[in-house]
Each structure stands twice: as structure tokens, then as C-alpha cells.
Image (tube, rainbow, N blue to C red):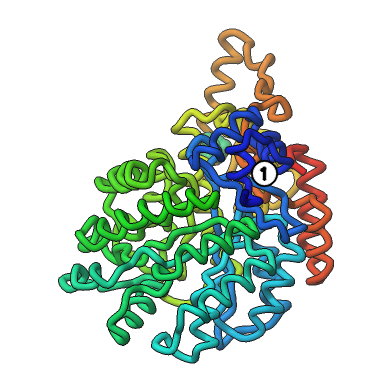
């Protein structure tokens, strides 16, 4: 029997990882086990990733957010890559994908795994292309060698572009933007050059055996995702999805966990259709969507265009959202772009959870609203999704400390502050405002950890502080201790 979470679940065993995610999600561990056994959720937890704090991805659990990091040929050093990991975890990434294509990939990956409390994902195809020298020189043997090495290193989940087949390629001919997935374009180029079937499809069962040995989770890549609204839901996209459904079942036959990646660029009226179709064809395997961007017109603001689609996808049943930064389509994101992208996606994920009525998800909203109506500015900042940003914006116009007790802000001013006017009127009528008090107790909330502040889910963990030390980030340490002491809702 494979030594994987799904194999254990199918055998009726509740593993330590299942116990831990049950605790973080406030769910019954037997329910977690059943969801894993049925393939409806995954716990990406490679047996060699010792620093991992297990988490779960599935539509019955809090919606998760992934952040992509990684170097390129032009920007590449270990310290910078560790800072990217720290920034992603600090601002609330539930998983991180290292899409590095620069130098020192092994050292960077191993260091990430040494420190990262969140699951780490990769696209092994990128390293294989670097080693081969060009997409055309890839071989099935080299792909397997790289996949096995990364599995031994401890990578928790890997994007495998096995669903794009030679017979799908003519279906992309009439597209406005062709094949926009990096991995998809590499596989298509290889198939056209060699006149053979996708090598990842050829060796899929061998990949399953490697994944079963180390407990790596599949993230089945959507190589033919639409790159613009005009290409949405076309024959090519849905033909590949049918193959991804077959590959899902083949992985399950090997006792390997699976999630399936999804688009891309999708207009609002097609978002739910995409989720429902994937759920039907892939028998409920968790859907991991990139955005989707609901319009193509806003380069520079694609964290917003895509967060709209992401919130809709979350409400329709997507389990994890891959963030998009303002730099999408334009360049490598900076730290500030990562912060903005993660904020947009934490909002989308939380909004989806509130819309879906996840137990306790709205408690955070209620607690913040109560602080707002009480003019408890310090508490409002502390509860904000990005406390530093909220405080900074308030203090731009009213920086003095006495304004932290003011019954107005600079938006409407003292005379026209509607909440102040409303409270005064109620006080005059009945004196009821004297009894105004907070009623939402976040300590007692049934919400999953990701639905409670602070957003950075691992800020106070020892590993995180060790990581902060390693990159000399005093600011991170300050934020960590402040958050855990003032908000008291850290899950670690
Ligand atoms: S001044 Fe306006 S924005 Fe500011 S607290 Fe009062 S009602 Fe809200």
C-alpha cells in the first residue's frame, strides 16, 4: 500500500496531519478522513518536508490562497528568494509555488523546504527544460529524473502538464491568444517537433508511482486554459479538461492525491459554469483556479480583475485561488505587488467563505464592524486584513494620537460623520448608546484559522521567526509579536 494520506484515509486511519487540519478548520477529524479518502480534499504533505504545518484544500473547507514566487535568469540569489517566501507567508499565503527558472534551483528549493511551514509546489518541467537546454531536447527519462529528485527533496505538490495531448493542438488554431500556459506551450512545441504524444502523458503511471512513494500531490496543469475572454470555454479547454478527469482517476488508482488547475480569463457569466464542469468531470477533485480574470482591459490592475473572478469561483466551489499581482502580463512582481496581490486574494477567499456560510467565517467581519461603530480605531486597525495599511491610510490625514479616540475621521469630518450623528441621536432618544459593546468573541469563533485575523497564518511560529532571523527581517519579527499579542487569534 502507498504511504500517502489518501491511502491511510481509505484504510480508515486518521493521520496526525488529518488531526492537525481538523483542529485548524474546526472540523471533525473523521470528516477530514472521509473527504481525503473520497478525493474531495487533499493534504499536500510530502513525507520529507519536516517544517510543514499541514493544511487542507477542498471545497468543504476554508478557501485557500496560493502565492507564486521564484527567480529568473535576471534576478537570482538565495537571500532574495527567502525574502519572497517570507513575504508570501507574512501576508497570508496558504501555499507557495516556486516557479524559479534561474540558477541555484536545488539550493533555493532545499532552503525553502527547510523553513517553509506551508506546502511548497513546483513545476518540475521548468527545471527539466533548463537541464535539457531547450524544450525540444526534453526526454521522458529526464522528466522522471527531475520529478523524482524534487519528490525526494520534499516538494509537496507538483504541476504536471500531462493533460494536453497531440490531438488537442489543432483545436487551438482559431484562438486569439493561442496557448498561454508556459508548461503547455513547452509540451505543444515538443509534440510538434517530435510528432509524438506528450511525454508527461506517456510516463504518467511512473509519475504516479514516484508520487505514491513520497506522498506528492498532483496539481494537474491546465495547459490549454484561455488566455483571453474570447478563448474561454472553447473546444481545446474542455477537451483537455476531459483528459484531466481521466488522469485524476488514474492517480486515485495509485493512492495519490489530486487537485486540478483551472483558468485563466473567464467572463463573469461563465465562472460558475467552469467550476461546475470541473467538479463534474473530475469527480469532485479540488479545483485550484488562477483568478480568473473577468476582463482583459486592465493591465496594471489584474489583481482586481482576477480577484473578482476568484471570489465568484470560491463561491461556486473552487477550493484554492492562485493569486495574481498587479504586475500580471507586465513583469516580475515586487514585494509591494506580492502584498497587494495577496490582500486581493485573501479578500476573495474570505468573501467566498462568507457567501458560502462557512461556520464562523463572518465573525471577523462582525468584530471589525463593531470596532468601527465604536470608533475603536486601534482595534479596527488590529482586526484589518492588512493592519499596517489601514493604520497608514488613517494617519496620512490624522496622525496625532488623540485622533485614535476621535468620533470621526477625515473622510466626512466631525460635522458630517454619519455614525457620530446616528449615535448621538440614539443617545438623545433612549440613552441606548451608553450600552454599546462588542458582542463578537473571535476567541470562541467556530471559524477556520484562515478566517480569523491575523491573515498571515504562521506569523508566530518558531519556524517563521527562524526564517525572519535568517534574512534579518526585524520588521517581520515586530509584526509577528504585535499581532499575536494584540489579536490573540494566531493558530499556532
Ligand atoms: S467620518 Fe465618515 S468615514 Fe469617518 S468614521 Fe465617520 S462615518 Fe465613517
The structure residue drawn at horizontal position 43% and vertical position 89%, both measured from the top left corner, is: 137
Residue 227's image quarter? Answer: bottom left
Count of marks placed on residues: 1
Residue 334 sits above or below residue 481 on the image: below
Q: What residue sits 71% from the left and 79% below the top? A: 107
User: As drawn, is 145 to the left or to the right of 110?
Assistant: left
Residue drawn at x 20%, y 62% is 230
Q: With 125 as the anchor, is 148 left or right in this view? A: right
Q: Position of residue 254 (x, y in %)?
A: 52, 52
Q: Position of residue 362 (x, y in %)?
A: 55, 30
Label 1 sits on residue: 381
Q: Secondary structure at mark 1?
A: helix
Q: Residue 336, image x and y in percent? A: 58, 66
Quick check: can you spot residue 289? no
Q: Where does ligand 1 appear, by image quarter? A: top right
Q: Quick one: quadrant of the C terminus?
A: top right
Residue 132 visible in the snapshot:
yes
Amino acid at each position: 500500500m502507498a504511504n500517502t494520506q489518501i491511502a491511510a484515509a481509505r484504510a480508515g486511519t486518521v493521520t496526525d496531519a488529518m488531526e492537525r487540519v481538523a483542529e485548524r478548520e474546526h472540523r471533525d477529524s473523521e470528516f477530514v478522513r472521509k473527504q481525503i479518502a473520497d478525493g474531495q480534499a487533499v493534504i499536500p504533505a510530502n513525507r520529507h518536508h519536516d517544517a510543514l504545518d499541514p493544511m487542507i484544500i477542498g471545497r468543504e473547507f476554508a478557501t485557500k490562497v496560493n502565492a507564486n514566487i521564484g527567480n529568473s535568469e535576471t534576478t537570482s540569489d538565495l537571500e532574495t528568494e527567502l525574502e519572497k517566501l517570507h513575504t508570501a507567508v507574512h501576508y497570508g499565503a496558504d501555499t507557495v509555488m516556486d516557479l524559479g527558472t534561474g540558477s541555484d534551483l536545488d539550493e533555493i528549493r532545499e532552503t525553502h523546504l527547510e523553513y517553509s511551514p506551508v506546502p511548497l509546489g513546483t513545476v518540475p518541467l521548468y527545471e527539466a527544460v533548463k537541464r535539457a537546454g531547450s524544450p525540444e531536447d526534453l526526454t521522458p527519462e529526464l522528466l522522471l529524473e527531475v520529478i523524482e529528485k524534487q519528490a525526494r527533496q520534499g516538494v509537496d505538490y507538483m504541476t504536471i502538464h500531462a493533460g494536453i495531448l497531440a490531438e488537442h493542438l489543432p483545436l487551438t488554431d482559431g484562438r486569439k491568444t493561442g496557448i498561454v500556459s508556459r508548461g503547455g506551450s513547452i509540451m505543444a512545441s515538443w509534440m510538434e517537433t517530435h510528432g509524438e504524444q506528450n511525454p508527461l502523458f506517456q510516463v504518467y503511471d511512473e509519475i504516479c508511482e514516484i508520487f505514491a512513494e513520497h506522498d506528492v500531490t498532483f496539481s494537474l496543469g491546465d495547459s490549454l486554459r484561455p488566455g483571453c475572454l474570447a478563448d474561454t470555454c472553447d473546444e481545446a479547454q474542455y477537451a483537455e479538461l476531459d483528459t484531466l478527469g481521466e488522469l485524476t482517476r488514474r492517480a486515485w488508482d495509485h493512492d495519490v492525491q489530486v487537485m486540478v488547475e483551472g483558468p485563466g480569463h473567464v467572463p463573469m457569466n461563465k465562472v460558475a459554469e467552469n467550476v461546475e464542469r470541473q467538479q463534474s468531470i473530475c469527480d469532485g477533485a479540488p479545483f485550484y483556479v488562477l483568478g480568473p480574470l473577468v476582463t482583459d482591459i486592465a493591465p496594471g490592475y489584474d489583481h482586481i480583475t482576477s480577484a473578482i473572478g476568484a471570489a465568484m469561483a470560491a463561491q461556486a466551489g473552487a477550493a484554492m485561488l492562485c493569486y495574481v499581482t498587479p504586475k500580471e502580463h507586465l513583469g516580475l512582481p515586487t514585494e509591494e505587488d506580492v502584498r497587494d496581490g495577496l490582500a486581493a486574494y485573501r479578500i476573495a477567499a474570505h468573501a467566498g467563505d462568507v457567501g458560502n456560510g462557512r461556520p464562523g467565517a463572518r465573525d471577523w467581519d462582525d468584530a471589525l464592524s463593531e470596532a468601527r461603530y465604536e470608533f475603536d480605531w486601534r482595534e479596527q486597525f488590529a482586526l484589518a486584513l492588512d493592519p499596517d495599511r489601514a493604520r497608514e491610510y488613517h494617519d496620512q490625514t490624522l496622525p496625532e494620537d488623540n485622533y485614535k479616540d476621535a468620533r470621526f475621521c477625515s473622510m466626512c469630518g466631525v460635522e458630517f460623520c454619519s455614525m457620530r450623528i446616528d449615535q448621538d441621536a440614539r443617545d438623545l432618544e433612549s440613552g441606548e448608546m451608553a450600552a454599546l459593546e462588542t458582542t463578537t468573541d473571535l476567541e470562541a469563533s467556530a471559524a477556520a484559522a484562515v478566517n480569523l485575523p491575523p491573515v498571515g497564518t504562521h506569523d508566530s511560529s518558531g519556524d517563521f521567526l527562524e526564517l525572519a532571523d535568517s534574512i534579518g527581517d526585524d520588521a517581520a519579527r515586530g509584526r509577528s509579536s504585535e499581532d499575536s499579542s494584540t489579536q490573540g487569534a494566531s493558530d499556532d
